[in-house]
Structure formats: structure tokens, C-alpha cells
């Protein structure tokens, strides 16, 4: 008989030829080496990753947004080093140098702000030359932002290497599904589950875009002080958008058994059709290795979690 579904939530990200799994206090990355074997790294998380701020409503959404970027960068650095390594196989991978990625993370944030927050404002602002009503200008900004977001995901999905990352993304979701359902952690069992997941980071980003559309729409209708004020407001309101979005996503996950909630979050699942692909058995093995490494780091026996089928 299978074990009871776990109440501990796990998340993760796909990386180059691998998967990162994050637990309450530990994370692990598993990567397929060019020679065929799987290399894993696990570590205990401290500081902001496990602090009290993660339990404060609205604040925890901002923490999760930063954590996703920071841990993702660290896992990506590890995976790229292993995936392209062909010599000196005995050399142990170095720990993640978090400070070394601070500049990269800041540049990434600037890119996101410039492309997905500032650019739609300037594009929508062009409509004001034709004396278009303020209502339609603000609405156009939100729709442009949504279009840029979906278009960007669809475009990068055409790149073969990114499609492989999306396969690992699917493997990550399927593995977490199996664990949460209390099923044995085997390739055969994992393959029974869907590649989409309610708590996916893609869902979080889509909710961010939709919340931004509504929040910025209301703000601009109440406060119309010119283009520069609108640009500044987008940057300053990012923490508010992230906080509200995360709370909505948590509510959606908690009440997903209700039909109206499933309907409301159906676009999130549909969007994962762009960010996930069906993995092969070897990719599922990597996801399982990452998950089991996370359990082992937390002192949980993976075998005990698998049940007896």
C-alpha cells in the first residue's frame, strides 16, 4: 500500500541537463554528466531562505521571488559546469559562490524591469498621440506586457537546448506529483503523472503579470501624473505585485479541489504547455536523484518515502 500523501511541499527548477529540488531547509541539484552518470550536490539552506520572513503574508512573496532567482542562478552555475565537463572527472565540484552571482542577478532584474515593466509603458504611451482615452492606454499596457511574456516563453521554447531544459522541467513536476501522491519514487510510477503542476514557477509569473495588469490599471486611473511617474510606480510596486501574486497562488493551491478555483487557474496550467515537455526515462532518473538527494540531506530515508507500491 502506498504511503500517505506528504504535507511537506517541495519545489524546484530545471537546469542544464539537470534538476534542482528545494525542500523546507535543504536543496539539491542532480546533473547528467556527459559520460552518462549523475552528479549531485546538496546543501542546507539558511538565512533568508528559511527565516521568519518566509512566513509573513505578502512579504514571503517577495522572498520567494528573490529566492527563485538566487537559487536558480546557483543551480545553473553548478549544472553548466558538470554538463560541459569532460576531463578531470575526479575533481569535486566547488560550493556555490553566492556573492559571485550578485551582479548577474541584478542584471537579470534590470532586464526584467526594462523589458516587461518599462517597455510596455512606452509602447502604450504611443497611443496618446492619437488622443486615445486613458482607459484604453492603461489597458493596452497590460495586454502588451502579457503578450511580451507569453511571446518570450514561446520563442525560447523553439531553441533545442531550451526544449531539453523544458523536458527536465516536466520531469521535476512529475516527480513532485508522485511524491505528493505517496507513490513509489520510480521511473514507472513517475511517468503516470502529468508534466504540469499547480505550484509551478511559470504559474507564479503569469499571476504576477495578471496582478500587475489590474494593480497598475487601478493606479493609473487614480493617479495620472505623467510618463515618468508611471515608470517609477511600476518599479516601486514590484514588491507589492509579487506579494499579492504569491498569496493568490497559495490560495489556488489550497483550494484547487474546488471547481471555480480550477477554472480560475486553468490558464496557468495551459501556459505550462509552453514551459514543459514530456521527459524521457533518463531525465526522470535525474529528477529522482535530485529529489532523493534533497530528502537525504534532510535526514529522510528515500526508501521509506517510496512505499511498497
Image (tube, rainbow, N blue to C red):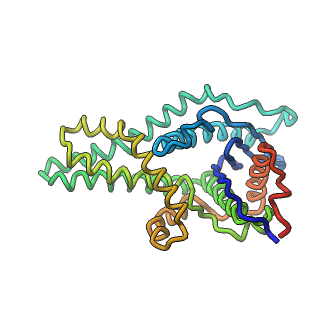
Q: Is residue 166 above or below residue 229?
A: below
Displayed quadrant of residue 297:
top right
Q: Which quarter of the figure is the C terminus placed in?
A: bottom right
Between 199 and 134, the residue placed more toward the observer is 199
Closer to the camera in the image, 90 or 72: 72
**Of residues 84 and 138, the one drawn nearer to the viewer in this rendering:** 138
Q: Nearer the viewer, residue 285 or 219?
A: 219
The residue under the point 65% across, 53% down is 9
Q: Residue furthest top?
A: 99
182 left or right of 68 in image = right
* Residue 162 image offset from top left, x and y in percent: 60, 52
Looking at this view, name the residue that lies furthest to the right.
90
- Residue at horizontal 57 percent and vertical 53 percent from the top: 159
Q: How many marks?
A: 0
Residue 200 in the image: state x and y as whole percent: 57, 56
Q: Residue furthest left?
A: 131
Q: Is residue 94 left or right of residue 274?
A: right
Q: Quadrant of residue 306?
A: bottom right
**Looking at the image, is 45 positioned above or below residue 254?**
above
Instruction: Give left or right: position of 203 versus 129.
Output: right
Residue 76 pos. (x, y %): 65, 40
Residue at 70%, 43% (x, y): give it: 27
Q: Position of residue 28 (x, y in %)?
A: 73, 44
Q: Is residue 289 left or right of residue 133?
A: right
Residue 267 vertical placement versus 43 (above, below): below
State which quarter of the image contains the N terminus.
Answer: bottom right
Q: Residue at x 68, y 36 (%)?
A: 45
Amino acid at each position: 500500500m502506498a504511503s500517505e500523501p506528504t504535507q511537506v511541499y517541495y519545489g524546484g527548477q530545471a537546469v542544464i541537463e539537470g534538476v534542482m529540488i528545494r525542500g523546507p531547509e535543504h536543496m539539491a541539484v542532480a546533473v547528467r554528466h556527459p559520460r552518462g552518470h549523475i552528479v549531485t550536490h546538496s546543501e542546507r539552506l539558511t538565512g533568508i531562505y528559511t527565516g521568519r520572513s518566509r512566513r509573513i503574508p505578502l512579504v514571503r512573496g517577495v522572498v520567494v521571488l528573490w529566492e527563485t532567482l538566487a537559487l536558480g542562478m546557483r543551480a545553473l552555475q553548478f549544472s553548466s559546469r558538470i554538463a560541459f565537463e569532460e576531463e578531470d572527472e575526479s575533481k569535486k565540484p566547488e560550493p556555490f559562490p553566492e556573492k559571485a552571482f550578485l551582479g548577474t542577478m541584478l542584471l537579470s532584474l534590470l532586464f526584467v524591469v526594462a523589458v516587461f515593466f518599462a517597455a510596455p509603458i512606452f509602447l502604450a504611451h504611443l497611443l496618446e498621440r492619437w488622443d486615445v482615452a486613458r482607459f484604453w492606454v492603461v489597458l493596452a499596457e497590460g495586454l502588451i506586457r502579457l503578450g511580451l511574456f507569453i511571446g518570450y516563453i514561446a520563442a525560447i521554447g523553439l531553441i533545442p537546448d531550451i526544449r531539453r531544459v523544458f523536458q527536465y522541467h516536466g520531469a521535476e513536476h512529475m516527480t513532485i506529483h508522485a511524491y505528493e501522491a505517496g507513490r513509489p519514487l520510480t521511473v514507472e510510477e513517475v511517468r503516470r503523472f502529468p508534466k504540469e503542476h499547480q505550484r509551478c514557477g511559470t504559474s507564479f509569473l503569469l499571476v504576477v503579470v495578471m496582478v500587475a495588469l489590474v494593480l497598475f490599471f487601478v493606479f493609473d486611473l487614480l493617479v495620472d501624473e505623467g510618463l515618468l511617474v508611471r515608470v517609477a510606480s511600476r518599479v516601486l510596486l514590484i514588491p507589492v505585485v509579487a506579494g499579492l501574486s504569491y498569496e493568490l497562488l497559495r490560495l489556488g493551491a489550497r483550494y484547487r479541489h474546488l471547481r471555480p478555483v480550477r477554472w480560475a487557474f486553468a490558464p496557468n496550467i495551459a501556459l505550462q504547455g509552453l514551459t514543459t515537455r514530456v521527459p524521457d526515462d533518463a531525465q526522470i532518473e535525474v529528477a529522482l536523484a535530485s529529489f532523493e538527494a534533497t530528502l537525504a540531506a534532510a535526514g529522510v530515508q528515500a526508501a521509506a518515502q517510496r512505499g511498497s507500491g
